[in-house]
Amino acid sequence: MLFGRKKKNPIKINDKGVVEWKYTTCGYCSTGCSIEVGLDAQGRAVASRGVADADVNRGKLCLKGIFEHELFESAGRGRVPLMRDKPWQEFREVSWDEALDRTASEIQRIQGTYGRDAFAIVSTGQIMTEEFYTLGKLARGVIGTNNYDGNTTLCMSSAVSGYKRSFGSDGPPGCYEDFEHTECLMAIGSNLPEQHPVIFWRLKQAMEKRKFPFIVVDPRVTMLAQMADIHLPVQPGTDVVLLNSMAHVILSEGLEDRAYIDAHTTGYDEFKALIERYDPEYASRICGIDADTIRNVARIYARAGKAMTIWTMGINQSTHGSDGVVAINNLNLITGNIGKPGGTSLSITGQCNAMGTREWSSCSGLPGYRLLEREEDRKTIADFWGIDEEFLPKKRGLFQTDIFPAIETGQIKGMWIIATNPMTSMTNTARIRKILENLEFLVVQDAYEDVETNQYSHVYLPASIWAEKKGCFTNTERRVNLINNVVPPYADSKPDLWIFNQMAKRFEQGRKMNFPETPEAVFEELRQLSKGRMLDYSGMTYEKIERNRGLQWPCTEGEEKGSQRLYTDGVFQHPDGKAKLIPLPFEDNNERPDEEYPFWLNTGRVVEHFHTRTRTGKLGNLNKFSPTPYMEMNPDAARELGIEHGSYARLTSRRGDAVVMVQLTHRVPPNMVFIPFHFHDCVNRLTLGLLDPHSRQPAFKQSAVRIEPVADQKAAAVRNRAARTY
Ligand code: SF4
């Protein structure tokens, strides 16, 4: 007699005819999973699997990683360069020389007519580190525009800004292994199971082995919040008040780490003076968390001995994003929780190589965390590149979110957009559309020619994608990992490195400089430029990176493994070696619900999709599991408005309107709705996106809307389906 599993049909996995597995690194999120792509006898990518001995993912992949091999031949890939005189005309196919010549001559025309900074470059968090470095060399050292930034301003610039203000440099100080040591974990505005599933799995494993208090701060009852010991449904945009108040409790009850504060920080007196105002009763009225809960959480955190905070967009995408990060750092500094196993403040990064652009792209400064504002740094890089130091600007130019308004005012006339899709990702879509129509010249470089922003381009350059090329990504925990080119570039698409190098040759200054042609040779420049710096790569080689399944920086010459944590010696990157405790007065400057627009609009992610669905919207299973945008709405609020589960409703904000399907759930309170941000012509028609004053990151998650039922449900369903089909 057969019992249990033996009685069931065994799971059958189709033999896909894999004859070879090739090592690479996932190209979606910043978790940095090591992945192997299986090739069949014809050399086609037919399967993906996690790498068992990789420390990051230990054989696991999420839904996106499992289907990643399907990317190479997915719909919408760009085959050849395209050109036209005006947007909306038919494109014509052209040679690479024609497309690059026209792009270079338009850059030169615009710069010659309006000045060097009238041409802007906006890139991504998706290309290889070697490509970022080369693009930076081209933008800063050859084209010479100071209006050059990445789309990382939409996701991580608050983390960068906060780390710089507190510690004197960017660079997340912790690692995933901290989950295994911590005695208390607080997650703020981070829904790991949907955003970073494999980091979530690492956390869950640690929690299953060893119980420690788990606190989640989020206005919504996310999947992660449902697992928390304590969930704090904070009022949108008021995290700083909660964190100030926790610091108030810790200092007033003498729970701080006095020795650490004295030895490793400055600014304590000013910080304490400000914190005194934030007693829990006062804070409770602003952040919506009752005073006793604030006290309880502060005591748990301070008494843990080893406590850590992780965060994602809930903190970063706010008008107080940078302050929120500083407030987290303040909390960890006063409790002595930086640089020790289980004690850290760890930003969970967004894109696969958002860290690579922060380190090497020169968007916000110069390569290797060097500053445009520092003469010594300008000189080092100018000498290394062989250019006149005076060619480099003495301070950074506009952030991405200021570049678009500068097009509106006529300050910027031309733009090069690389692997990003502002027509879907930026707030207030209607405004972005008009802005793009104002450009005299737009070149879009992307692996997909059907990316929405390409509707406004004059030239389209088809780039190779992910593992069609070779190079490195850096993940959330500063781990540099290798991407091998497992298949050749699709059709006549070219690696971004090749495109940047070809562009450099079309400028007089570029012809005089050395632009290495292989990723290996570019990586050698990174090793040289990083030697002795905080982000030291000098101990890394491609072979060693692959052998170790990624190496964390700093990794100095001769070292076999990199370093897991920063600031273990309590020495920070400010000139005096101390971290700063920074007072953070709170001013409520968001758009808020009112009588006319009574609901908070919150936005976020779903596990099936990545960013603007340029890739995941084309992949069968991912799109099948999440085919359409939806709105989470509280059933009580819906009943009052006569809105039913599964029906379509119209949302209206001061910017525009959108129609989405309603999902009734108690995940959101009655005065809030939530919509995933991935879909074109949807939630960003509504968002306002006020900017953080330090990081210039938009407040995607705090807008006000009104909601009404849609009379003609059938027409709404038809329109919705048509809009989502590629
Ligand atoms: Fe890729 Fe992130 Fe999923 Fe890992 S968790 S497989 S890195 S998308």
Image (cartoon, grey):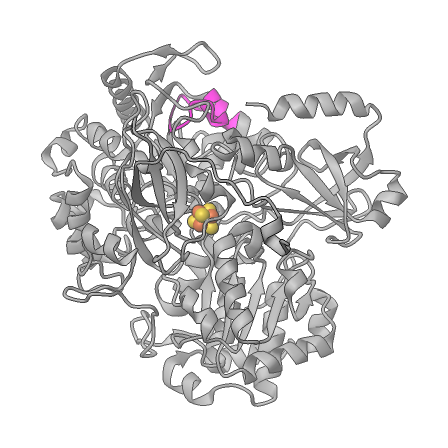
Question: Measuring 40% from the left and 51% from the top, which residue is drawn there?
Answer: 33
Residue 725 location in percent, x, y?
Answer: 59, 23
In this rendering, is residue 106 above or below 190?
above
In this rendering, is residue 493 above or below 163?
above
Which quadrant is the C terminus positioned in? top right
Tell me if residue 705 is in the magenta stretch: no
Instruction: Tell me if I can see residue 364 in this picture.
Output: no
Please tell me in which quadrant of the rendered image residue 68 appears: top left
Which residue occupies the foreground of this view, 401 or 495?
A: 495
Task: Say left or right for 692 vs 492.
Answer: right
Task: Say left or right for 588 vs 533.
Answer: right
| Outermost residue, front side | 1
Question: Measuring 80% from the left and 52% from the top, which residue is drawn there?
Answer: 670
Which quadrant is the N terminus positioned in? bottom right
Please tell me in which quadrant of the rendered image residue 212 appears: bottom right
Which residue occupies the foreground of this view, 310 or 571?
A: 310
In this rendering, is residue 605 above or below 406?
below
Please tell me in which quadrant of the rendered image residue 135 appears: top left
Residue 564 location in percent, x, y?
Answer: 33, 68
Residue 681 location in percent, x, y?
Answer: 61, 29
Q: Total label count?
A: 0
Task: Say left or right for 382 vs 147.
Answer: left
Which residue occupies the foreground of this view, 203 or 407?
A: 203
Q: Which residues are magenta?
A: 434-455
Residue 292 location in percent, x, y?
Answer: 72, 79
In this rendering, is residue 556 above or below 251?
above
Instruction: Tell me if I can see residue 35 in this picture.
Output: yes
